[in-house]
Image (spheres, rainbow, N blue to C red):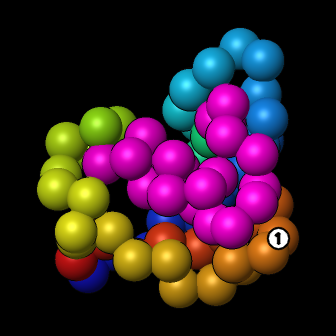
Amino acid sequence: MKIIHVVVKAGSKKGPSVELGTDGLLLVGVKEMAIDGKANKAVIEQLAKYFDVAKSTIILKSGATSKYKAFIID
């Protein structure tokens, strides 16, 4: 089990991206807006691609309504 701390940029015009920030946090940009959990789902998809794991192994631990989130990768 691994906990990943993320900063999300919802509604990003650049499209989906995952970058390692200078502070050690992952910066995830997604086109989806933060409405009805669409951005959270998009972030999970991007993290799954980045870590090469199934989406079902990634769980949002905290920050459902914040740009600062923590995910568990099982």
Q: Point out the residue furthest to the bottom here.
A: 61
Q: Is residue 47 magenta?
A: yes
Image quadrant occupied by the C terminus = bottom left
> What residue lies at 76% left-to-right and 46% top-to-bottom?
33
Residue 51 position within the rendered picture, expressed as x and y whole percent measured from the top left:
28, 45
> What residue lies at 33% left-to-right and 69% top-to-bottom?
58
Give the crowd class for mark 1: few <14, some 14-19, many >=20 residues within 10 Å.
few
Q: Can residue 37 be seen in this view?
A: yes
Classify mark 1: helix, strand or loop.
Answer: loop
Residue tagged by mark 1? 66
Residue 47 higher or lower than 18, as above or below: below
Image quadrant occupied by the N terminus = bottom left
Q: What stretch is highlighted in magenta?
A: 29-48
Q: In this view, does 70 lie to the left or right of 74?
A: right
Q: Which amino acid does label 1 sit on?
A: Ser
Residue 45 higher or lower than 57, as above or below: above
Residue 14 position within the rendered picture, expressed as x and y whole percent measured from the top left:
71, 14
Residue 7 position within the rendered picture, expressed as x and y whole percent measured from the top left:
73, 53
Residue 12 higher or lower than 62, as above or below: above
Task: Give the image quarter of residue 31.
Answer: top right
